[in-house]
Amino acid sequence: MAQFGLAGDARRTAAWRVRAIADEPVRHTNSRGTIAYARGGGGTSTTQLNINLKDKPRVATLNGVVSPTIAEVVAGMEVVDSLYSGYGEAARPGGRGQGPSQDSITRQGNAYLVRGFPKLDFVKSARVTREWRAGAER
């Protein structure tokens, strides 16, 4: 999966860290191109999202907590596929990943990423192209 959502400025990340988003109900499997909140358990969704790079036959869970999909890439999946993946998963004690540490990103922001992960891709900007309101026709 491709994960993103921590701010490049550590102060912005800190401001959003305490603002959890309510859990969504499970309505769709975690198939290729679907987007879900990255989280560490129930009630922990904040600003981080992940895009599934392949189909997952079962709904993704962490410690038994479901991570429901909330969106889907409908055009441009080739861009997602082109993101650099050479660092692998985040570095964790006892783990195999050599990717960035979320704790270090949280504390140091983009300075840490640019210094230690020069091949990493970044989201330079994002914008809302259409807003769906609760109860509105889709």
Image (tube, grey):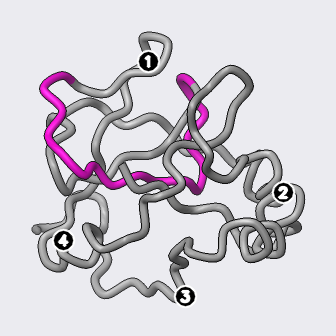
* Residue 65: mark: 1
Q: Which residues are magenta?
A: 41-58
Cα distance, mark 4 to mark 2? 30 Å
Could you tell which of marks 4 and 3 lies nearer the N-terminus? Answer: 4
Say what secondary structure mark 4 lies in: helix
Left or right, 11 with reference to 120: right
* Residue beneath disc 4: 77
Q: Position of residue 13 (x, y in %)?
A: 77, 61
Q: Nearer the viewer, mark 2 or mark 3?
A: 3
Left or right, 67 with reference to 44: left
Q: Is residue 57 above or below residue 86?
A: above
Amino acid marked by disc 3: Lys
Cα distance, mark 2 to mark 3? 20 Å
* Residue beneath disc 3: 124
Q: Are marks 2 and 3 in contact (CB under 8 Å)?
A: no
Amino acid marked by disc 4: Met
Q: Nearer the viewer, mark 3 or mark 1?
A: 3
Say what secondary structure mark 1 lies in: strand
Q: Is residue 28 above or below residue 127?
A: above
Q: Nearer the viewer, mark 4 or mark 2?
A: 4
Cα distance, mark 3 to mark 1? 31 Å
Could you tell which of marks 3 and 1 lies nearer the N-terminus? Answer: 1
Report the residue at 49% width, 42% height from top: 38
Q: Are marks 4 and 3 in contact (CB under 8 Å)?
A: no
* Residue beneath disc 2: 14
Could you tell which of marks 2 and 1 lies nearer the N-terminus? Answer: 2
